[in-house]
Image (spheres, rainbow, N blue to C red):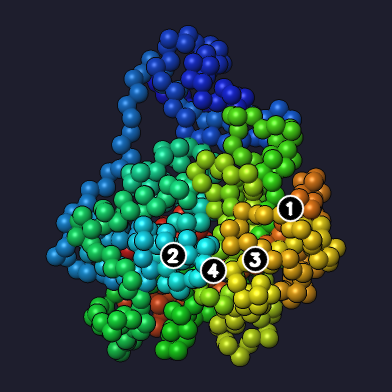
Amino acid sequence: MIKKISLQVTPENSDNKSYLIKNIANRLSIKSKNIDHIEIIKRSIDARRKIIKINLIVNVYINQKFKPKNDNHIKYQDVSQKEKVIIIGAGPAGLFAALKLIQNGKCPIIFERGKDVRNRRRDLVKIMRENTINENSNYCFGEGGAGTYSDGKLYTRSKKRGDVNEILNLLVDHGADSDIKVNAHPHIGTNKLPKIISSIRNTIEKYGGKINFNSKLIDITIEKNQIKSIILSNGTEIFTKKIILATGHSARDIFYLLHRKNIKIELKTFAVGVRIEHPQKLIDKIQYKTNQRSDYLPAASYSLVKQINNRGVYSFCMCPGGVIAPCATKNNEIVTNGWSPSQRNYPTANSGIVIELKVDDFKKYSSFGPLAGVEFQKNIEQKAYKLSNDSQRAPAQKLLDFMNNKLSKDIPKTSYIPGTISTNISDIFPKFIISTLKKGLIEFDKQMKGYLTNEAIVHAPETRTSSPIRIPRDKKTLQHPDVKGLFPCGEGAGYAGGIMSAAIDGIKCAKMC
């Protein structure tokens, strides 16, 4: 028989199979020899008390042989001669849409403005060493999308475990560690994700699909409210009746293109703020309530949220043992984000600390219609660039100095490789953002004593939390209500917020093609 049980153990015993079997046998009042196998199906950390515990949910095989499950029941087929569906963007939405199309007997043809993961890496080096941004190949654009080189977190709010498990299984099939199916907060890591993305590309191409890099969409033609063709930056026109538009939250040129062609888009709220970096040892001390983190515990993380004056103030994309990265997509702007390697073993921890925006906050840009949020973002990013003396050095301030409106002296070197420049960060944002942010940070310090410290460095700005627009679509067909054959998809269209939800949305759109 198979019995599912929950148990709490110390970190050092959480992977000790002999200990777990003995513990479970005592609990079930059976002999250890009767337990043929234990299968851990969920793992999480409980750090609420001084003695930290690991929560496990396990399947116990009692007098029954364990047979590993084959979660991959997908059988792909050669679709090279089948109906072709155009996908714009090779991020998680586009890539997982392509896998589902192949499964359903259709041929995906992907056009990606950026480069493949290997060649894309060279452009990231140029950003950090030369302060030069390739506007089509950077942290946001290129094979794998924004998540490839900015962390690979697999968090999602989706309540449909079937959808979540499908994505996790596909990632494992393409090289991810199977632990992502067990851990409460699964994470792949920037160092491992590129190989997985390359493996997905190989599957797509093996079964007849195609991925075209350095292929930027510049126009869409429509005839009688039906998609007719796309036009690429090299002048090539490709005729098609179906487009999955999965361009990501930073493809502003696509938003402007749609608006210019009178294809309806809508203003959507998002959040902006800063990225704060602490020593990882300090976060470990606060969260684990110890001066020395156990070797059996991962780098501590945190998740904070407060309501201040009817606005949410919250941590975003928290990266334990990680670094801050330059994620601008143009040479006249600064954008920060963060990532962690798979081991999360860097000496610093960083997180976006952002505030919720509302439609009324964009009144100054109302003349731009649904693009008001884009202009709001651009204003902050360009102001930060000017304050950095036209470089990719991030405006920075010690955290307590920021709270006290004091210019910082001797800012220590941070994980942000282009470097920092001492700035009064309050000069970058509208006053309501700064006042709300400071009140939120005071509340965070009450929850995490020691969070407010000059050991922490504030970097600005964090502006690309999600898309500033939504491209409407019919709830049943997932097509744009005014343009047949246009399937707005993923984070850029306003229907996702990370790798998992974007991948899930890509699959949903592919099913409707």
Crowd around label 3: few <14 · some 14–19 · many ≥20 (10 Å) = many
Q: Residue at x 39, y 17 (%)?
A: 36
**Residue that carries the numbered disc 2 in the rendered image:** 123
Name the kind of residue labelled 4 in the image: Asn
Q: Residue at x 51, y 52 (%)?
A: 151
In terms of depth relative to the viewer, which is nearer, 320 or 44?
Answer: 320
Q: Earlier in the sequence, mark 1 or mark 2?
A: 2
**Residue that carries the numbered disc 4 in the rendered image:** 131
| Image location of residue 170, percent across then percent down | 35, 48
| Image location of residue 89, percent across then percent down | 37, 68
Tell me the distance, in whole angstroms, between the alpha carbons under discs 3 and 2: 19 Å
Tell me the distance, in whole angstroms, between the alpha carbons under discs 4 and 2: 10 Å
Circle 1 — which element?
Answer: loop
* Dot in front, 4 or 3: 4
**Residue that carries the numbered disc 3 in the rendered image:** 394
| Image location of residue 127, percent across then percent down | 51, 65
